[in-house]
Structures are given as structure tokens and as C-alpha cells.
Amino acid sequence: MCGIVGYIGGQAATPILIDGLTQLEYRGYDSAGIAVIGPSGARRVRSVGRVRDLEATLPKRLAGKVGIGHTRWATHGAPSEANAHPQADASQRVFVVHNGIIDNARALRAGLEADGVELTSDTDTEAIAHLIARTAADTLEEAVLATVARLTGTYALAVLDTAHPDRIVVARNGSPLIIGIGDHEMFIASDVSAVVRHTTQVVHLDDGECATVTAGGFHLFTADADHVGKTATTVEMTAAELELGNHRHFMLKEILEQPYSLERMLTGRLDERFATARLDGLNLDPQALRRFKRVKILGCGSAYYMGQLGAQLIEELARVPADAEPASEFRYRNPLIEPDTLYVAVSQSGETADTAFAVQEVKRKGGTIVGLVNVVGSTIAREVSGGVYLHAGPEVAVASTKANTHMAVGFALLALALGRVRDLSITDGTRIVKALKELPRQIGEIVADGDKVVEAAELLATAPSLFFIGRVRGYPTAREGAQKFKEISYRHAEAYQTSELKHGPLALISPELPTVAIVPDDELLDRNIGALHEISARGGEIVAITHHGVEVDARLVIRVPKTEPELDPILLMIPTQLLAYHAALALGENIDKPRNLAKSVTVE
Ligand code: F6R
């Protein structure tokens, strides 16, 4: 979704802004723009389409050492040059880039129009630029504070004022914003990936905070405090991790990275002596962990499916009732928050608005919420009382793969920790610890053996519609498989519980509707094999994802190594990632940036 960059220092701002916007492209956007203040005043350039389209329209000389830029994902108003950011006031004195949504924009715009202001866009952001410019205040900071006091909704703002060319003023409420600290130069971004080439020292703004950013430093303040003290943190990410290298797509790069990223995630977290997981970041001692009678997992999209997988792991290993719910539903239904429930927010980006809101709802009602989050220092990571960082490294492809695997493994660690303070025996704990240690190598085997997957993907890509089925442990894997397939191949893929087929969907089975079946070699194998016979008997084509040695009646069989039954769904998921990738490749789709989707859904 929308992205913000800003620069102030001794270098030419334009190339830095363009590079930052390029780094933010993966988030999804439909227009882009920059504004730079140079010796002859301010200049704004905006364009619909990609950052390279914007670059092509830039004048040869766009001098200036201070500027702001934006990639816009249309919310108020269609993608157009007029609606692209930076938005400006009538005299083009104040320029604003904004992420988030202003809920009272309609009223603010009407008020401005009633005062005779001629609005030139359909955006909520334009109102902010006019309001700042029209506020009678001694300083830009006061004008920004007075304006944000009138806003309801979410925002990360960066404001440039030609009357104060020595600064950028920023503000945050509900949308991420960071300040990157350089050597006599400062950066602003909505996402560290935009600044990591220049600095690894960043300060995360919290809700309600504003900052004056100059070439020499920054000064944080709020409506109530002239000064907020905060120290910088070091970003783990490196610029090299954001490079494609020899890979054709980030999605494939990220699938192939999993053996190494998982190894890193597990380092130091497996306690072989006591057959448990070391999760100090949870900030919950064994007594506190024992106190919980239920676990409720909240996440969106694929993170929610991984939450379902996690709930099963927790029930199986810790024997604590657990369930998962889409955070996007939870937040709207006045949920009951129980003191003896452990709430877990799961998110790759740590910025998903629905999940962040659900976290706040749990906290507001006195619940305990921890996080399974990938992006260090993200909004959700900072809101929760503790958690498990996923350490998957940056995920650039919109379709999430390695972060999902890390979420599933994160839940296995949590289940182990919860189980070992209850009735999970040391023998069973050891069994899981050993199996977790083996997972990276086993994933390596799966991704190295891609031929069958490519063949299956090419077969499935020709079908307009398909089923993904799985039973009990296999069902979240089927749901995630279907999600990945539809996201990037644009083929209709529906997940069903294998057990539910005969209660309705079997009617759809025909040679035109193939089924991807998740068939673990576990206590439900016979039942799953029976369901596959029912599909073949009706002429349905089957691609089975199963273990070595299992006899299945299927057109194509993809085999994965066996692990412990509780962890099987994790390995069975890896071929579904590759299936989606190769199907989209065969169809010639835009794999890393599928239509209509954004990497990080920071609006509601
Ligand atoms: C699917 C996908 C989305 C995200 C969802 C939550 O490939 O990426 O369904 O899983 O938008 O995002 P995070 O995990 O960042 O909260």
C-alpha cells in the first residue's frame, strides 16, 4: 500500500527519493510523486503508473537537497495525477504526503470549500495541505499539530513547507513512520526498506508523535510534550537482502531461502536438555504460561491460515483449547476478552491495520496479547507485551511464502513451550525438538526436487477452477495452498475439508475441475485415500501432495519427507507454494506484484 520517503541533507534529494520509492514498489501502488525544494523554489512531479514512469517525466534538473516522495494506493479518488501525492495547498507552499485514511475528510473538504478553497483532487490528503497552510501559527510544527488535532482516522504524514526549507515535519497516528539517521543527513520512510541502503539507525515514531527533521538531527514532540526522548535502534535488514540476485522473481527467491532462514530462526530457540523452546521474548515465565486456559490467535489472510495451523499445534501439543479468527472480523464484533486467554497476533509486516486494531482492542479490554511478527520494530511488534520474532528476513513478493513457514514454526515453538509447562512429556518434547531441527534440511530437499511440481503446476494452470482439500491437520495447508494459487495465478481455487466433500462439493467434481489433495501419512490416511477414490470415480483429476511410500490414486504425486505428524502440515505446504509459483509462471502473470493486492494492508 502507500509508501512515504523523505530526505534532507547535503546530497541531491531526487535520486534518493526515486530510489526509496523503487524500494517501496513491492508494497503495491498505482501512482507516485515527489516534491523537492531547490534554490528556485519548490517543484512537484507526479505520475500515474510505476516509479519508472515518474522518473521518465522528471525534468533534467530537479535540484534541491530536501524533498518528500510517495507511492499511492488509491483510496479517496481514482488513480490519477491530480490525486497522486504530494498534495499541495492553493499557493503551492505546503506539500504533504500521507499514508492512511482520514475518516472526516468529507467534512474537512466541505468546510474548506465553504471557505472558498478550490480543491483540485478527490483526496483526503489535499485537505491536510490546505489546513496546514491556512492555520495561523508561528511555526510549521504548531500548524501541523493544530491540523492533526482536527483529523480523525489514520495517518503517517510528511510535510514540506517552502517557508521553512530547512526541515520536514512528520506526524504519525496508526500508520508506520520512521526516521533514518545518517551523517549530516536524515531520511524519512514508512518502511525501513526505503532507507536501509543509507542507514541502519532508525527511530520509530509512535502514535501521537510528531517530529521536526533537519539535516543535523530530529526533534520529537507531541501535542502535550515539547520534547520526547527516544534512542535509535539498529535495523537487522541489509540492502543485499532486498536484491533479486540471480533469481527471476522474489517469490521464488523467498521460497528457496527457507532452509537457511528457518535455520536462523531456530538458532538458540531449541532447548534439547529440557525438550522445550526458549522464547524469552514472550516475557511470560512458566507460571504465567500455565495460567492461560485458552489461546486465541488473530491474523489476516495467510497469517490467519497459519493461525489455524498453529491452533491445532497448540491443542495437540499443549492440550490447551485454541482457535484462530480473522483479525478483520474479530475487531468488528465487540469480542469478549478473557483474562485467562492468551491472545496471539500473527503478522509478517506487523503493520496490517486490522490486526493492529485487534491488538489494541485486546489491550483496551485488559487482555494479554503477544505477537508472532516478522518485521522488527513494526507497529504490532511494539504494541504487544512480548512475542516471537519470526526472523524470516525481508519478504518482498506480495504473496507470502517464507514468512508463512516461519509463522507455522513459530507456533510449533509456542506450542512446545506451552506444552512443556503442562503435560507434554519430555519424550514427546524431545520428539518435536528433534523434528524441528530437521525441518530446514527437509525443506531444502523439497525445494530442490521441483520437476513433479512444475508438471503439476502446468496441468493445474489450464483449469479455470480447482479444489484444494485437506483433513484436520491438512486443512489449513489446503486453505493456504488455495490462497496462494488464486493470488498469483488468478485461477479460482477453493479449499475444502476432505471430510466435507461428500456433503456438497462432490457435485462439482468433473474432468474440468482438478483437485490438489493434501494426504499426510497419518492416522487419517485411509479416510483420505477413500475420498480420493470418490473423486477419481467421478472423473476428477488429482494432484496429491503426500509422503514417500504412500500409494495414492492420482494423476500426479508430489512427495515430501515425513516429519512428526504434528509438523507434517508445514512440509506439505512447501509444494503448494511452488505449485502457485509455477502455475503463475506458466500463465505469464506478474508473480511478485499480483493485481489488486498490496504487500502490507495498512488501511481498513
Ligand atoms: C497472502 C498474503 C496476505 C497476508 C495478509 C496479512 O500471500 O500475503 O493474505 O498474509 O494480508 O499480512 P501480514 O502477515 O503482514 O499481517
Image (spheres, helix red, strand yellow):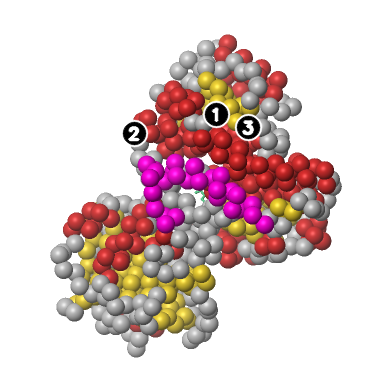
508 drawn magenta: no
* Rendering coords of residue 263 (x, y %): 60, 49
Q: Is residue 434 above or below residue 4?
A: above
Magenta: predominant secondary structure element?
A: helix
Q: Amino acid at mark 1?
A: Phe
Q: Is residue 85 left or right of residue 567?
A: left
Task: Give amino acid for label 2.
Answer: Gly
Q: Quadrant of residue 586?
A: top left
**Residue at disc 1, secondary structure:** strand
Question: Disc 3 or 2, which lies upstream in sequence?
Answer: 3
Q: Which residues are magenta?
A: 240-268
At mark 2, the secondary structure is loop
- Residue 279, image x and y in percent? 70, 58
Residue at the spot x=42%, y=64% of the render? Answer: 196
Front position in the image: 219 or 159 = 219
Give the labeled residue for mark 3: 561
Instruction: Kindly identify which numbered label has been placed on residue 140.
Output: none
Q: Residues within 10 Å of mark 1 (few under 14, many from 20)?
A: many
Q: Element under label 3?
A: loop
Left or right position of 175 against 331: left
The kind of residue on which mark 3 rests is Pro
Q: Mark 1 highlights which residue?
A: 468
Figure quadrant of residue 1: bottom left
Instruction: Decide: few, some or many residues near mark 3? Use Cα within 10 Å; few <14, some 14-19, many ≥20.
Output: some
Ligand 1 lies under 8 Å from the Cβ of mark 3: no
Residue at 58 percent across and 11 percent down: it is 537
- Looking at this view, is 104 or 469 the one in front? 469
> Which residue was labeled with disc 2?
588
Could you tell me how far apart the alpha carbons at marks 1 and 3 are, in whole angstroms? 20 Å
For the point 42% across and 57% down, which residue is it?
240
Q: Disc 1 versus disc 2: distance between alpha carbons?
A: 22 Å
Frontmost residue, 178 versus 118: 178
